[in-house]
Image (tube, helix red, strand yellow):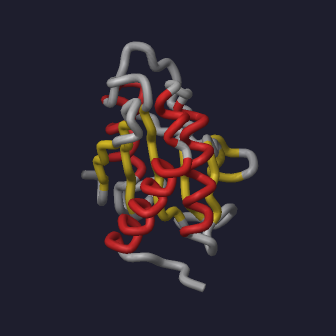
Amino acid sequence: MAYSYSINEIERRVLVCLEILRRKDLHLFKIGCHERTVAHKLGEYLQSAFPDWHVDLEYNRMAPDLVKELPDVPDCSEERTTSRIYPDIIIHRRGAKFKNLLVIEIKTNSNDRSCDYEKLKLLTLPKPQGHFRYVAGLFIKFDRKGDYELVWFHNGK
């Protein structure tokens, strides 16, 4: 069992999953399905690509009684009123502190990226300032043809 992956290996496995998603689920993009639907299907493929990790959608916990929060996130948009976050997809070890591999934010019908970029920067900060320390972050913007634009984040950048 591999417990760690290089950045290149993470990116390679994600690209394979994105191509499977486009090939098998193009209909979802053509009809303009919500990002949660797309995230669910992508999460299924990611679980197969990272079988020794947990793949969860909108996972909002740091611990059983502690919600996932980023104090600086409300400042990224006038619409945000809370520091609580619900990443679209995460690959992590449930219950293990700082065993966070990849965090993904998805957009299908919106062009607003500012808060997603800010979250991904903060979630990938290394120690000592990083509270989550994801190895990598990924922003994915899908269009109606299933084509996608990727922006990767490492070490808060």
Q: Is residue 88 above or below residue 35?
A: below
Residue that extends furthest to the bottom in the rendered view of this protein: 1
Query: Residue 106's spot in the image, x, y percent?
Result: 45, 38
The residue sitting at 36% across, 37% down in the picture is 141
Residue that extends furthest to the left in the rendered view of this protein: 157
Q: Horizontally, is 154 left or right of 2 in the view?
A: left
Q: Horizontally, is 40 left or right of 132 in the view?
A: right
Residue in the foreground of this view, choosing between 110 and 57: 110
Q: Quadrant of residue 39?
A: top right
Residue that extends furthest to the top in the rendered view of this protein: 78
Query: Residue 41's spot in the image, x, y percent?
Result: 60, 47
Q: Is residue 70 above or below residue 80?
A: below
Q: Quadrant of residue 105?
A: top left
Quadrant, the N terminus: bottom right
Q: Is residue 137 above or below residue 128?
A: above
Query: Residue 27's spot in the image, x, y percent?
Result: 54, 35
The residue sitting at 48% across, 78% down in the picture is 4
Q: Is residue 125 above or below residue 39?
A: below
Residue in the foreground of this view, choosing between 114 and 9: 9
Q: Quadrant of residue 74?
A: top left
Q: Horizontally, is 115 left or right of 81 in the view?
A: left
Residue in the foreground of this view, choosing between 25 and 83: 25
Query: Residue 127's spot in the image, x, y percent?
Result: 37, 63
The residue sitting at 74% across, 45% down in the picture is 65
The residue sitting at 43% across, 14% down in the picture is 79
Residue that extends furthest to the right in the rendered view of this protein: 64
- The number of numbered badges drawn on the structure is 0
